[in-house]
Amino acid sequence: MFYWFMKNLIVGPIVRTAFRPWVIGHENIPKNGAVIVASNHLSFIDSVFLPLMIDRQISFLAKSDYYTGKGLKGWLTRTFLKSAGMLPIDRSGGKASEASLQTGLQVLARGEVLGIYPEGTRSPDGRLYRGRTGVARMILEGSVPVVPVALIDTEKAMPLGRRIPKVRRIGIAIGTPLDFSRFQGMEGDRFILRSITDEIMYELNQLSGQEYVDVYATSMKEKRSAPAR
């Protein structure tokens, strides 16, 4: 109820009026049943626009750091993220990664929509980076289709480091569902997981028109932040 209230009566109308987002392929989101929405990741506001523009409620796995703020600002951030369907997870790796997987599978087991950013983090420069295979494992273990979705120009509205978004038009291109049921039971094969992930990233590349870089976005961020020698 709270999600519906925020989406339809408060946040949604404001965002639609100010940013006038365009959407193509809306009919590609299944009207019912569990499904994964796999998107490129350009800006913090991706997790705001995408849930608002899809009719079904969508849950995103968000890093738990967003939920640790104190005071009024921290409370407002937590409230806003919850209203957007965000689920806090620990992304430190190891057992935390397994817990994140189980959190996502619980969403799918309820027949709901799960949002995932295969790149694992926001693009540092607007290019599309190599996907992580966690999305493929979740697809196979959850026995669900995946819908590729490309966000357009959100990094121009709110680049990395900017606190308040600039008002400008953004877009969402929704591709046709991908079925990987032919690989069912092979979630332990890392070559299969890589193949599935690469196919998803190819579709995102076609939808977004971004330049593709075959390295992880985290590696590029680390390279950029390393002190010059």
Image (tube, grey):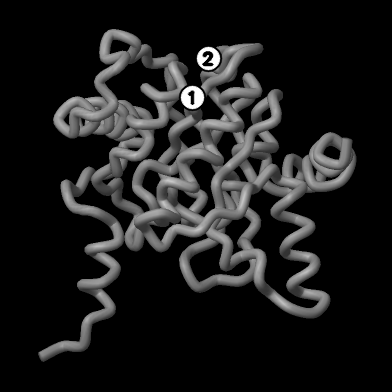
Q: Residue at x 54, y 54 (%)?
A: 89
**Please, which residue is most extreme toward the front here?**
95
**Residue 104: where, in percent of width, then height?**
53, 37
Quarter in which the N terminus is drawn: top right
State the residue position of label 1: 174
Amino acid type, label 1: Ile
**Residue 208: where, in percent of width, then height?**
37, 35
Between 185 and 49, the one nearer to me in the picture: 185
Between 221 and 111, the one nearer to me in the picture: 111
Amino acid type, label 2: Asn
Quarter in which the C terminus is drawn: bottom left
Q: Residue at x 42, y 46 (%)?
A: 98
Q: Measured along the vertical axis of the image, is residue 39 above or below residue 41?
A: above
Quadrant of the rendered image containing residue 110 = top right
Q: Measured along the vertical axis of the image, is residue 27 above or below residue 104?
A: above
In the rendered structure, find residue 28 and report the number of the disc placed on it: 2
**SS for dot 2:** helix
Q: Residue at x 44, y 52 (%)?
A: 42
Quadrant of the rendered image containing residue 78 = bottom right
In the rendered structure, find residue 38 and report the number of the disc placed on it: none
State yes or no: discs 2 and 1 in contact (Cβ < 8 Å): yes
